[in-house]
Image (spheres, helix red, strand yellow):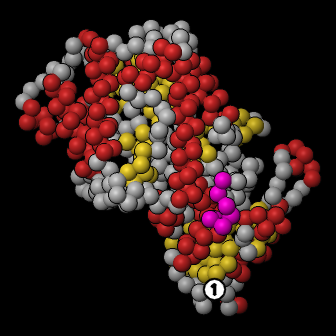
Amino acid sequence: MIKNTLLPAAEFCQRRSDFIQQMPVNSIAIISAGKEVTRSNDTEYPFCQSKNFYFLTGFNEPDAILALVKNANGQAQSILFSREKDALQEIWHGRRVGQIAAVTDYQVDLCFSLLEVDEQLLPLIEGKDAVLICQQGEPAFEQQVMSWLADIRKAVRTGAKVPKSLLDCSDIIHEMRLHKSSAELNIMRQVNVISGAAHQRAMQKTIAGKFEYQIEAELLHEFARNGARHPAYSSIVAGGDNANILHYTDNDEALNDGDLLLIDAGGELAGYAADITRTFPVNGKFSHEQAIIYQLVLDSQNLAIAAIKPEQTFAELNRIVCNFLTQGLYDLGILKGDLEVLLAQRACKKYFIHGLGHWLGLDVHDVGDYHANAQREQCRPFAANMVMTIEPGIYIPLNDKSVDEKWRGIGVRIEDNVAVTETGYENLTVNAPKTIVEIEQLMANTK
Ligand SMILES: [Mn+2]
């Protein structure tokens, strides 16, 4: 359990009060922490807190429950339920915050042991008009809440009043998470710098003959030694044709002289993710064809980033990138046919097979509505303090017989993390080398 020192308790307090403002009067929100997940037998995966719960508490222990109460008169209360102090458990498994420190350090109004949850929570639920929970992805906790409601229902003949509605409050929290505070932006800047340094280190340590997982080890080393102990997601370290497998995480093959290496990796700091992709030559020097495809992807990315500002949309950025990549692939003879038709069909999607970007924050694919329309275009107007990735790519698999052999096996993705500002954008990804010159120079200087 690492106490979060990067975000002050006051920020979490403010979030709870902003959330409570949006609750109906005479309701209770019940938000559950994450559970430990068994890896094998009696060992667990590293614990990852439920991000909605973390967003509202900063509290990093499993099994806890947050109850936010808004009474009929508008009065509010934050109540945490957490594991009780237990000398023996703590000797075996680690320290616990306990109920006293939870109140002082996390600034909730009250904290009870989980052993008291039925006794304390049922009277708070009883008599409310609505119960709010995060339904998305938490069916087991929803069952728990249903069973509490059933317990109250058993007492209706003695006057118990059962809440009439069970509401999903995921959207309220997700909207709050989409708009970053200045403290959150600061952490996201920091984790981007840490992750950029990891990409630099990966470039410096790459030589033909090493295995992909050895480069992964360099990334993890650089994350952890700078305070981002865990990666935000499983690192993709994909040499040669492996780059054409979008979510390749086997990372177990040898790197070959003459191939590109695609790395999609970011650290997690105070719960916040970086999500950076770089593609560079294993031997430190782009081949002619690799350089052409790389520059095309890079130019398209720069075009998209330069167009970011309030009111801009992913749909429009997609249009800009698709037009540019389609034209470029046509000029290279990789796309053949009538240019107008190819542009209208967005023919580049044959080789640019994923979306242009996504929201970024506590989750790497962060929450927040995209306002997708019937054509699946993401039309949500950007606003200041939203953070997103911009990650165009071109993937030409080795077995694609429709293109000249010289292009086959090239897979390039370039991904930066960008915050919307009042007047434009701020690229948070400031130290991961990106131009061909920068990459070749860095790699030449370390050989
Ligand atoms: Mn991404």
Could you say where residue 38 lies in the image, as x and y percent from the top left?
70, 41
Give the side of residue 313 with respect to residue 130, left or right.
Answer: left
Query: Which is more toward the observer, 268 or 371?
Result: 268
When the figure is inspected, residue 406 is found, relative to residue 121, above or below; the finding is: above
Q: Nearer the viewer, residue 19 or 280?
A: 280
Q: Nearer the viewer, residue 40 or 240?
A: 240
* Chain part drawn in magenta: 6-12
Residue shown at the point (26%, 50%) measured from the top left: 315
Q: Which residue is mark 1?
A: 75
Place residue 143 in its image quadrant. bottom right
419 lies above or below 168: above
Residue 142 appears in the rendering: yes
Residue type pointed to by label 1: Gln
Query: Horizontal and vertical percent for residue 417?
Result: 44, 43
Residue at left offset 28%, top offset 35%: 300
Position in image of residue 358 (x %, y %)? 40, 47
